[in-house]
Image (spheres, rainbow, N blue to C red):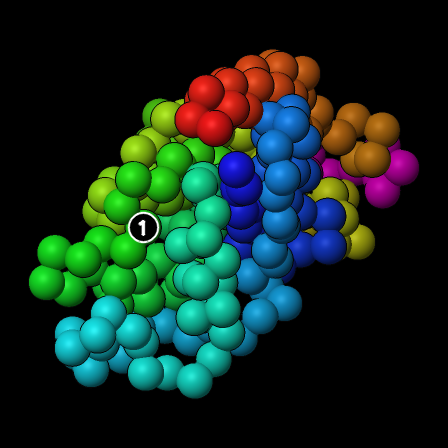
């Protein structure tokens, strides 16, 4: 049994990658992590040339990732919310899965899926919801979702303490860099860590029962 973990974040300190890896580590099963930002995956062109054989004709790294998922039993996908939707890197990947579904093939069908979204809006959870929607669209079996507020980029850009349009100002007003760092909101908190471990344990139990 094997799982694939994917993070679509382009950030060095990617909480989506940390959470996805925590889930997979807790599962106890063999896994491989993939960082989409390090790969060349373009968006769907809508050319329909994939209809004949369920393979995208674009020459980039997409098929390499697809082949690994097809060989695996589960996919844990994590990505961040940029302007109310999954970030562009993750969105491009899921767009391209249109190539896998022609003539009732659904090449990801039956794979276990776990959606991890970094969403600040707890009411909408747009990134989490989009990942889950795309997994279901590919006939995957979504066994869990996890949403976390994610990374506060305004605390790391170097100007957040003195910028009136960012998150630092929204939470504490104009301040000093030292005070901003000292009062940084908790990221990937204990509840999310606890949830990640529970989801990972469940994933491991489900796959172990299938051996």
Instruction: Where is residue 178? Give x, y as percent.
Output: 89, 37
Question: Is residue 172 part of the magenta span, yes or no?
Answer: yes
Q: Nearer the viewer, residue 92 or 153?
A: 92
Is residue 165 positioned above or below 48 on the image? Answer: above
148 to the left or right of 153? left
Is residue 41 positioned above or below 172 on the image? Answer: below
Instruction: Where is residue 15? Give x, y as percent.
Output: 64, 40
Instruction: Where is residue 117? Give x, y as percent.
Output: 47, 38
Q: Would residue 67 be seen by someone viewing this image from the given angle?
A: yes
Q: Residue at x 73, y 43 (%)?
A: 155
- Which residue is denoted by mark 1 in the rendering? 108
Question: Is residue 206 part of the magenta span, yes or no?
Answer: no
- The segment highlighted magenta reads 167-179
Is residue 115 positioned above or below 165 on the image? Answer: above
Q: Residue at x 20, y 82 (%)?
A: 49
Instruction: Where is residue 115? Give x, y as percent.
Output: 43, 36
16 to the left or right of 48? right
User: Quadrant location of residue 184?
Assistant: top right
Q: Would residue 115 be seen by someone viewing this image from the given angle?
A: no
């Amino acid at each position: 049994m094997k799982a694939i973990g994917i993070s679509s974040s382009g950030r060095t300190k990617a909480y989506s990658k940390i959470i996805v890896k925590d889930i997979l580590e807790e599962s106890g099963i063999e896994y491989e992590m993939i960082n989409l930002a390090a790969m060349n995956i373009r968006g769907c062109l809508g050319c329909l040339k994939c209809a004949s054989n369920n393979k995208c004709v674009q020459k980039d790294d997409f098929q390499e990732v697809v082949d690994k998922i097809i060989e695996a039993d589960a996919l844990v996908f994590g990505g961040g919310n940029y302007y109310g939707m999954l970030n562009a890197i993750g969105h491009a990947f899921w767009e391209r899965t249109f190539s896998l579904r022609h003539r009732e093939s659904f090449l990801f069908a039956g794979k276990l899926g776990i959606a991890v979204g970094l969403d600040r809006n707890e009411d909408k959870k747009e990134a989490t919801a989009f990942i889950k929607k795309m997994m279901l669209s590919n006939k995957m079996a979504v066994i869990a979702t996890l949403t976390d507020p994610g990374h506060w980029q305004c605390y790391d850009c170097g100007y957040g303490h003195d910028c009136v349009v960012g998150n630092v100002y929204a939470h504490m007003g104009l301040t000093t860099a030292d005070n901003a760092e000292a009062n940084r909101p908790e990221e990937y908190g204990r509840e999310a860590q606890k949830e990640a471990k529970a989801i990972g344990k469940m994933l491991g139990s489900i796959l172990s029962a299938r051996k």
